Amino acid sequence: MKPKVAFYWCASCGGCEEAVVDLAEKVLDVTAAVDIVFWPVALDFKRADVEAMPDGSIAAAFINGAVRTSEQEEMAHLLRRKARVVIAFGACAQTGGVPGLSNLYDRESVLAAVYRESPSTANAEGVLPQTHYPVNGETLELPVFQERVRALEQVIPVDYSIPGCPPTPKLLADAVAALLTGRLPERGAVLAPDKALCEECPRRDSKPEKLAIQQFKRPHEALIETDKCLLAQGLLCLGPATRGGCEARCIQGNMPCTGCFGATSRVRDFGAKALSAVASLTGSNDEAEIARILQSIPDPAGTFYRYSLPVAPLPARRAPAAQ
Amino acid sequence: MPEASAPNGPIEAAAFEPKIVAFFCNWCTYLAADLAGTSRLRYAPNVRVVRVMCSGRVDPQFVLEAFAQGADGVLIGGCHPGDCHYQEGNYKALRRYHLLRRMLEQMGVEPERFRLEWISASEGERLRAVVNDMVETVRALGPLNERPAPQVLEEAVVR
């Protein structure tokens, strides 16, 4: 019998599902080797089907997306019970991802922004999502929208993670191959190379020995040369602080790295370390000038914690204990 | 020494004493603290000093970790500009400080809780003034980690 594999999505955009689809014809190799027993985005299996499976009967569950609702939390626990190996697939599952940035705000502010205040919202009665709602004698249910966003490992034990927003099809194919051959690394490992993106960057040779940046530019503020180190052009590229293994896809698309592969194993907190790496490149020793140059980074938290705020040390007091 | 409460009086709630984690560079500010000590200068005992070789050694991760583990304020002390034992470690500290301060503010940490000061080995008196001032500033702000917890929410959100 072929090993069983499940895919699930929590708080995510669907891009990680796209990474699976991007296996293209290789997906046939995958389905030849494994049975996909659960994949809500593509296959018509339901939660009850998973519940009916014996515990530990799934070889591996690939879960993408962060955890924000009670349904996502329940599904994470369910798949943890049913699967022998759980893989956090993609930046949101691994470290919270973009949805995790909402941890900068409390739950009420998030609901108010989305359902009441955004300019495109028409909600004169101020209706907010409710967990129970009676209609025609029936009660409709919605999952609870929890206080904050969590990474998967803050909800259930996770065996491995595959970084990226989204991960590359190659990393997925490698992970499946490792699963099939049993050649998995130590539990807890990140299934990607453990070196900085700069080391595999095609523009590496044009990176100057010493960088002294006079203004941090955002992509729309510059005409970007296609063959020169982006930092040398003043673009805020997080390559020096970010794990490689993404095949430098953004760089090849002439866009700076935003850090979706997270930190290497030597770094505890990606955001603080990335901030450190970037700030050090400020090209001045004069305090007023330093402050002026750094003003060209308008949103430090959103820039450096774009993918990892829920696993950051701060804001600690916003973290209620896991239920 | 704080006075013991009167034996018959009610036990008062302990007043808030700010905890300040201070990273002092080996060559200047730590020696200033030494000088303050040998000069018998009295200053607020709220500072836990961590000696580092250079203010440039203070990784922003240390600062976040200090706040996360209960510090109400973080103070970095380094050599004056131009005086760094390692040429420009203090400039790197200065650059990181400016960006980190802004990021901390986004994360709910008031900028006054995080401070970078240049204090040379001969400035024991200045060290005292800076520490006392920081302790009073943070005392006025109150504890960082014991503010009202986010409101505990019921399952249903009513209209």
Image (spheres, grey):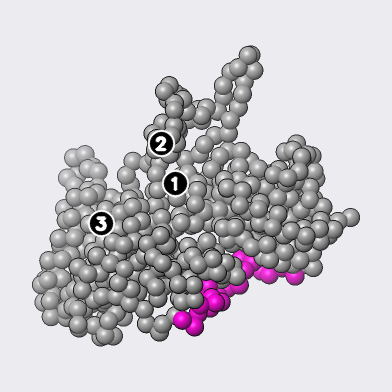
Residue under the point 17% across and 75% down: B119
Q: Quadrant of the N terminus of chain B?
A: bottom left
Residue A50 drawn above or below residue A56? above
The amino acid type found where label 3 is placed reads Pro
**Is B138 positioned to the left or the right of A258 in the image?**
left
Please tell me whether mark 1 sits on a helix, a strand or a loop: helix
Determine the image quadrant of residue B11.
top left
Q: Specify the farthest residue to the top.
A: A137
**On the image, numbered disc 2 is attached to which residue?**
A118
Residue A76 drawn above or below residue A226? above
Q: Residue A60, how many percent across, how many down?
A: 73, 55
| Mark identifier at residue A186 | none
The amino acid type found where label 1 is placed reads Ser
| Mark identifier at residue A102 | 1
**On the image, numbered disc 3 is attached to which residue?**
B111
Q: Determine whether label 3 and label 2 are within 8 Å by CB.
A: no
Distance from Cα at disc 1 to Cα at disc 2: 15 Å
**Is A289 positioned to the left or the right of A251 in the image?**
left
Determine the image quadrant of residue B135.
bottom left
Q: Magenta residues? A: A183-206
Q: Residue A265, how many percent across, how many down?
A: 54, 70
Q: Chain of mark 3?
A: B
Residue A22 drawn above or below residue B35? above
Q: Around disc 1, counting alpha carbons within 10 Å, would you say few (fewer than 14), some (14 to 19), or many (20 or more)?
A: some
Question: As rendered, which of A269 and A36 lies closer to the eye?
Answer: A36
Residue B63 magenta: no
